[in-house]
Image: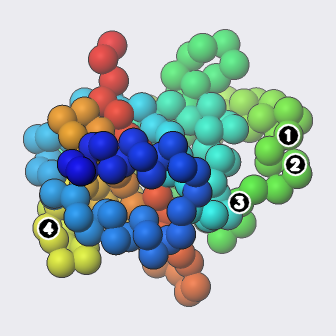
């Protein structure tokens, strides 16, 4: 079975363990910086992580890679349809996770209202080639956070990303990026 078919099967079966996700990630080929340039739509890759479904609940659009030096790591769609780039410095990762409030309509509304204050026009990350789990691949390095998002190729229009956060006891968070066509 090729990687894309296996990927689709894993997504269809529902949450998998972190160990299974890492094993699949290790099978995938690295990507270079040029491959990552452009606009990408994001969605979850469930692994029973405390952040599973959180980004989607807040209408996460994805990421925008304008160049290796100009990267917008957090792009969300507001309720009015406007795409907004947010500054990750305002998001305390140690508290990020699913809760009754964060997954509620009130939580979505509060987040949407907050996007007015946390938006930015400035790039907040860069792309670099780094080694992770034995392979060198394109990696988004946050400017103000101890986070690297490492990407591996599923097919020509999809990558599997893993958020590698420098924090004690933090498990990797997995997500999917699909190349935006518009």
Q: Is residue 90 above or below residue 173?
A: above
Task: Kindly tell me whether residue 161 is visible in this rendering.
Answer: yes
Q: Look at mark 1 in the image and give the residue it sits on.
A: 104
Q: Look at mark 4 in the image and give the residue it sits on.
A: 136
> Residue shown at 22%/58% (left/top)?
28
Q: Is residue 120 above or below residue 29?
A: above
Ranked by sequence position, the earlier of labels 4 and 3 is 3
Q: Give left or right: position of 16 versus 22.
A: right
The answer to which image quadrant residue 178 occupies is: top left
The answer to which image quadrant residue 146 occupies is: bottom left
Residue 144: image location, x then y, percent = 44, 62
Ranked by sequence position, the earlier of labels 1 and 4 is 1
Residue 60: image location, x then y, percent = 56, 35
Q: Look at mark 3 in the image and give the residue it sits on.
A: 97
Label 1: state its secondary structure: loop
Q: Are marks 4 and 3 in contact (CB under 8 Å)?
A: no
Ranked by sequence position, the earlier of labels 2 and 4 is 2
Tell me the distance, in whole angstroms, between the alpha carbons under discs 1 and 2: 5 Å
Q: Look at mark 2 in the image and give the residue it sits on.
A: 101
């Amino acid at each position: 079975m090729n990687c894309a078919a296996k990927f689709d099967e894993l997504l269809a079966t529902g949450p998998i363990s972190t160990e299974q996700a890492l094993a699949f990630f290790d099978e995938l080929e690295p990507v270079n910086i040029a491959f990552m340039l452009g606009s990408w739509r994001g969605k979850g890759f469930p692994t029973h992580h405390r952040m599973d479904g959180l980004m989607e609940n807040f209408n996460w659009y994805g990421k925008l890679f304008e160049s290796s030096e100009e990267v917008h790591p957090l792009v969300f769609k507001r309720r009015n349809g406007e795409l907004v780039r947010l500054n990750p410095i305002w998001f305390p990762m140690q508290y990020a996770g699913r809760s009754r409030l964060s997954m509620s309509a009130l939580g979505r509304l509060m987040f949407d209202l907050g996007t007015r204050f946390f938006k930015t026009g400035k790039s907040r990350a860069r792309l670099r080639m780094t080694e992770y789990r034995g392979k060198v691949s394109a990696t988004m390095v946050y400017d103000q956070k101890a986070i690297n998002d490492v990407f591996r190729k599923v097919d020509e229009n999809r990558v599997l990303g893993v958020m590698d956060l420098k924090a004690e006891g933090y498990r990797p968070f997995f997500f999917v990026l699909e190349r935006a066509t518009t």
